[in-house]
Image (tube, rainbow, N blue to C red):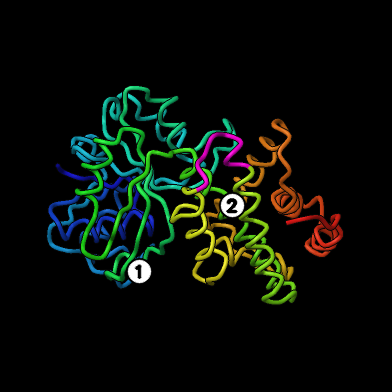
Amino acid sequence: MSISILGAGAFGTSLAIALASKGPVTLWARNQEHVIEMQFERQNSRRLKGAKFPENLELTAELVSASSNDILLLAVPMQLLGSFLKENATQLAGKQLIACCKGIDRVTGLGPIDLIKTIIPTAHSAILTGPSFANDIAIGLPTALSLACTNEAVGLGLQDRLSTPFLRLYRTTDIVGAQIGGALKNVFAIAAGAAIGAGLGESARAAVITRGFAEMNRFAMHFGARPQTLAGLSGFGDLTLTCTSTLSRNYRFGFALGRDAPFDATTTIEGAATSFAVKALSETHQIDMPITQSIAAIIDEKSTVATEMKHLLSRPLKEE
């Protein structure tokens, strides 16, 4: 089965490099100039500088060519996924589409797989998620990810095709848990970064991670997720990595909020948009999500880190 990665950001590029160890891979970028630059340099110096391309990694700006392959990994930012699918629905109809983004679409309130199913119902969808940083994958450091697909037979085939000696995929049919775990961990990473940035200390961050995990479970299980999925790679695993590393964009954004410091506006922060989407859903379904509510209020400039931290610390004491 031939593979294309649609989207030449850091994560898409790292997957292309890793999967090219097993056979030819096509990496698609929207910008022709970017493609020419990568072809000449044999690396993606804009997004993943220093990670050299294998010989069998091909580059193209032609979506028609890239989408002719059997397996298409969609490495498109979550808030752009819907428009990308609509623009290319005819081209992607009936294809095996694997979402490689994390979040909840702010317009529809849907996760990546649900968005694919809604816009391109003939496509066969799955999601690749879990604790990972692009540079680790690109240089061959051991990484374990979760592959969620409702069709177990399809999932088995994808697991075999997309696993490498250093990139290990673990299968699940729980697409709800996989989508929500990957989305909410970014919100709580912002909160963890804000706690450290505000000088509240490591113990406060541990509390944010623990209570954030409780929120994740409460929200996901309301929509039918399985507890074991949330305790696995796509839930607790990803939450732990993202809340404790400065390599996480969401964590660094939260840290800047805590310090009341500027942050690069061109950096994609999936947790920001997701906090608004989850806030809206939690209010509609009456799910208690205090950390998420606080992060949305801070980002929306309706409150401050100091005010929300005080609010969270003053919540009623109760049994855990």
Picture layout, residue 29 above or below residue 284? below
Picture layout, residue 202 above or below residue 218? below
Left or right of 277 in this view: 286 = right
**Residue 59, percent across and down?**
21, 52
Q: Nearer the viewer, residue 6 or 158?
A: 158
Q: Quadrant of residue 91?
A: top left
**Does the segment drawn in magenta span residue 281?**
no
Which residue was labeled with disc 1?
136
Helix, strand or loop at label 2? It is helix
Return the mark for residue 210.
Answer: none
Q: Nearer the viewer, residue 277 or 166?
A: 166
Name, please, the residue furthest toward the front: 319
- The CA span between labels 2 and 1 is 21 Å
Q: Nearer the viewer, residue 176 or 105?
A: 176
Left or right of 313 in this view: 108 = left
Mark with earlier residue (2, 1): 1
Q: Quadrant of residue 113?
A: top left
Disc 1: CA contacts within 10 A as few (<14), some (14-19) or many (>=20): some
Left or right of 191 in this view: 101 = left
Name the residue rendered at 85%, 62% in the picture.
Answer: 310
Name the residue rendered at 22%, 56% in the picture.
Answer: 19
Q: Quadrant of the C terminus?
A: bottom right
**Residue 135, percent across and down?**
36, 68
Helix, strand or loop at label 1? It is helix
**Residue 190, percent across and down?**
63, 60
Magenta residues, start to end: 219-227
Q: Nearer the viewer, residue 278 or 88?
A: 278
**Residue 132, percent across and down?**
41, 62
Q: Amino acid at mark 1?
A: Asp
Return the mark for residue 271.
Answer: 2
